[in-house]
Image (cartoon, helix red, strand yellow):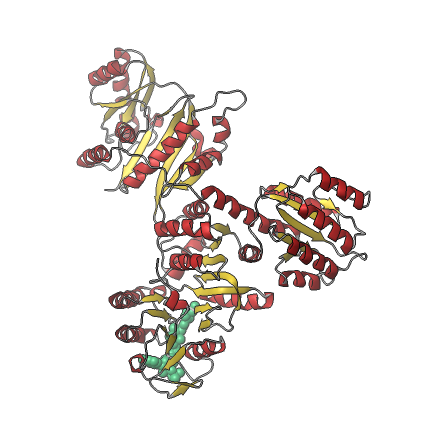
């Protein structure tokens, strides 16, 4: 792991490009470092000044008589290279480069950035930026940025690929009273990137939750490794922009990074336990929930409300987020019944009805939170004349203190009447929302994280020892023939070398050879035209089914070539493949596409000709794919219901399907040269599976 200790907690800092002129970035940085209460040594560097903001100024960094842990650079882009070189010579190991005008501005900037990277490498320096706002650590404390404010101290580690977003979130957080442990503007990520900061925050005792805005990740594989480990230690919540086509384009010109498909990001997040927020609002709702609440033990939610409507809305949302409405014990129900008015609802959602006051709330809340069947609590309140929202807030704070192991959130629905009480709750670490939906969504985030942490803890990558040498031979042969697309028979051969059963299939060059192969295989057989150029063989008369004799096979061979030539003229044909007819089974698909960021992305789902129409598929990255994760991948599809045995059908061999996915994952991990792979259909039987049609493309 990269050690970032000196970046966040330096004993001495030089600001190169420090300025006496208020309004300039070089002034703001020095001013922020001082006003954040930084206790280390601060050295402004400026060739023309003697002193800046009461600190002795040096002409160059090399003139500073003491060791410097961190240099913050804010000189114009053309000067950055020279300054970085001086830092290297002065033995400085950590740089924050604020200056813009690098990769984000095009070719020339990119070349400058390369030069800068080369210097940091030469001297073994680590660098944040360039083109960033800077960083802050509230526990050091230090604000080495040119933001307009310093964050409050708290437990959220925040990283952002947009500096401007940092500035606005900071401002907003002050109004909300939200605190941060670390605050990092990633900039161009020329050296240090999101993964380094996630790994660092995972080990940081002051950070309880890691929150970030990213447009891309620099190294998908490393992201997966680090995020998987880190998310077992603490929750990671990310918003990834650039999901739309236009957004992706904007993101790539913002950072100059290769984006990778959104599907791959979605999958990577899911598989590593990263919670993906869909909006900035959700990002911070979740951040607040994780910073203030314990991780719940389960998914059962109790709702206490003084009005029916919001209770029902909340209940709908509980179901929508795959949480459960709590089932109270008999004792709880009895106690509620005895003490609440007869009109009250004593089951979840508990309705203490419209004339409730704070004492009735207190009784209901204490009773349901004490119930062992309740893992989470939502308190709903609508302002009525019979209650004082502030008193109810006090009751909630009190009950939360009695049951600190259960998350408690609130929705006080209203405006002027509830604003003070809502703020009081928030200040006392009880997230309070104006509506039930975000309250339940926040609980859902906590529950989802708990599920991940408990299920993913001991999962290991599924591995399989295939026969890579034999696969290599097949690839050599294919390339020797000047092709990159494997024939069906070659694809089947590759699969069998990795333990995936495939229906026997062989290539014939002549009608006689086809008949001979069919005889050896056993009738009935299927004939398929073998050509890397033909995707839909049936459409051009290139497939003949159920052939029972040698004569039928020979005739079919000739017919197929005639058909194909008739439809496609002089298309490249390698021969005709003879395949044994296999019994019908459930038709599944296993596919693989290689993502530029995350490597092999596997797809599983209902196969056959309706794949594109029904889109009943789920995705996982091959990297680190565990057996349990494959099972979850299967379960995500509707096809799984069929596989389990729908309406009296016999169940399919699910363990064999799981193994097949695992073996395909191993194959594509072992062979980065496989660019695409499709098994469609994979036939699943009561016992075993069989790959019927295999398409593999390799890199040239
Ligand atoms: N060592 C130290 N200081 C030097 C220097 C050197 N070798 N050469 C020049 N300086 C001083 C300048 O004299 C000046 O100080 P002054 O105010 O006393 O004159 C200071 O460094 C800054 O240089 P200046 O030429 O005034 O530049 P600037 O302040 O107008 O702009 C940047 C510098 C870095 C702020 C600007 O180039 C930039 O990149 N701005 C955008 C930053 C940004 O948006 N980042 C991303 C945010 S998300």
The residue at the point 42 percent across, 42 percent down is 458
Residue 301 placement (x, y as % from top left): 63, 45
The residue at the point 26 percent across, 11 percent down is 551
User: Residue 332, located in which quarter of the rendered image?
Assistant: top right
In this view of the protein, which residue sits in the foreground, 366 or 84? 366
In the rendered image, the quadrant that contains the N terminus is bottom left
| Vertical placement of residue 450 versus 396, above or below | above
Residue 685 placement (x, y as % from top left): 41, 22
In the rendered image, the quadrant that contains the C terminus is top left
| Vertical placement of residue 345 versus 203, above or below | above
Residue 595 placement (x, y as % from top left): 35, 46
**In the figure, is residue 15 to the left or right of 322?**
left
Q: Residue furthest bottom?
A: 50
| Vertical placement of residue 351 versus 3, above or below | above
In this view of the protein, which residue sits in the foreground, 112 or 139? 139
The quadrant of the picture showing ligand 1 is: bottom left
Residue 19 placement (x, y as % from top left): 41, 82
The residue at the point 61 percent across, 51 percent down is 407
């Amino acid at each position: 792991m990269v050690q970032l200790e000196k970046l966040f907690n330096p004993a001495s800092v030089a600001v190169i490009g420090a300025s006496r002129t208020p309004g300039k970035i070089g002034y703001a940085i020095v001013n922020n470092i001082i006003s954040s209460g930084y206790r280390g040594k601060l050295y402004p560097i400026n060739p023309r000044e003697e002193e800046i903001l009461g600190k002795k100024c040096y002409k160059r960094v090399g003139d500073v008589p003491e060791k410097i842990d961190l240099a913050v650079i804010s000189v114009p882009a053309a000067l950055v290279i020279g300054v970085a070189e001086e830092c290297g010579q002065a033995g400085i190991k950590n740089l924050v480069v604020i200056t813009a005008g690098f990769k984000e501005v095009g070719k020339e900037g990119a070349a400058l950035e390369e030069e800068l990277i080369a210097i940091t490498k030469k001297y073994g320096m680590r660098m944040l930026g360039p083109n960033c706002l800077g960083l802050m650590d509230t526990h050091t404390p230090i604000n080495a940025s040119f933001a307009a404010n310093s964050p409050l101290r708290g437990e959220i580690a925040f990283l952002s690929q947009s500096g401007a977003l940092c500035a606005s979130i900071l401002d907003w957080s002050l109004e909300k009273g939200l605190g941060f442990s670390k605050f990092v503007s990633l900039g161009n990520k020329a050296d240090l990137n999101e993964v380094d900061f996630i790994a660092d925050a995972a080990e940081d005792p002051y950070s309880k939750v890691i929150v970030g805005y990213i447009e891309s990740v620099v190294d998908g594989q490393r992201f997966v490794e680090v995020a998987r480990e880190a998310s077992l230690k603490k929750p990671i919540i990310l918003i990834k922009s650039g999901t739309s086509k236009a957004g992706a384009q904007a993101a790539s010109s913002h950072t100059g990074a290769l984006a990778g498909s959104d599907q791959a990001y979605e999958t990577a997040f899911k598989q590593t336990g990263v919670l993906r927020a869909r909006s900035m609002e959700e990002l911070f709702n979740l951040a607040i929930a994780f910073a203030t609440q314990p991780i719940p033990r389960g998914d059962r939610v109790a709702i206490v409300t003084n009005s029916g409507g919001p209770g029902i809305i909340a209940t709908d949302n509980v179901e929508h987020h795959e949480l459960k409405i709590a089932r109270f014990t008999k004792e709880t129900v009895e106690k509620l019944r005895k003490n609440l008015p007869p009109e009250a609802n004593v089951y979840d959602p508990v309705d203490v009805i419209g004339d409730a006051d704070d004492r009735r709330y207190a009784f209901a809340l204490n009773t349901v939170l004490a119930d062992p069947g309740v893992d989470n609590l939502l308190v709903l309140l609508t302002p009525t004349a019979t209650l004082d929202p502030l008193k109810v807030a006090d009751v909630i704070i009190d009950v939360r203190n009695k049951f600190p192991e259960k998350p408690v959130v609130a929705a006080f629905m209203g405006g002027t009447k509830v604003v003070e009480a809502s703020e009081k709750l928030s200040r006392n670490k009880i997230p309070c929302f104006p509506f039930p939906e975000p309250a339940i969504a926040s609980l859902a985030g906590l529950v989802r994280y708990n599920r991940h942490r408990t299920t993913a803890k001991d999962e290991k990558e599924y591995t399989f020892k295939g026969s890579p040498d034999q696969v290599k031979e097949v690839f050599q042969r294919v390339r020797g023939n000047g092709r990159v697309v494997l024939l069906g028979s070659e694809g089947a051969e590759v699969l069998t070398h990795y333990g995936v059963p495939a229906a026997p299939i062989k290539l014939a060059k002549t009608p006689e050879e086809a008949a001979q192969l069919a005889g050896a295989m056993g009738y009935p057989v299927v004939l398929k035209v073998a050509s890397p150029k033909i995707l839909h063989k049936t459409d051009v008369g290139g497939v003949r089914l159920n052939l029972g004799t040698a004569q039928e096979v020979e005739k079919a061979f000739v017919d197929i070539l005639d058909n194909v030539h008739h439809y496609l003229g002089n298309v490249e044909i390698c021969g005709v493949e003879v395949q044994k007819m296999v019994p019908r089974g459930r038709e599944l698909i296993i596919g693989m596409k290689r993502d530029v960021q995350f490597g092999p992305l596997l797809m599983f789902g209902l196969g056959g000709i309706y794949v594109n129409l029904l889109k009943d598929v789920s995705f996982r990255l091959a990297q680190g794919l565990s057996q349990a994760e494959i099972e979850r991948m299967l379960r995500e599809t509707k096809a799984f219901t069929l596989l389990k045995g729908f309406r009296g059908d016999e169940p399919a061999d699910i363990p064999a399907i799981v193994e097949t996915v695992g073996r395909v994952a191993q194959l594509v991990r072992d062979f980065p040269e496989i660019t695409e792979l499709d098994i469609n259909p994979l036939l699943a039987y009561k016992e075993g599976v069989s790959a019927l049609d295999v398409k593999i493309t390799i890199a040239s």
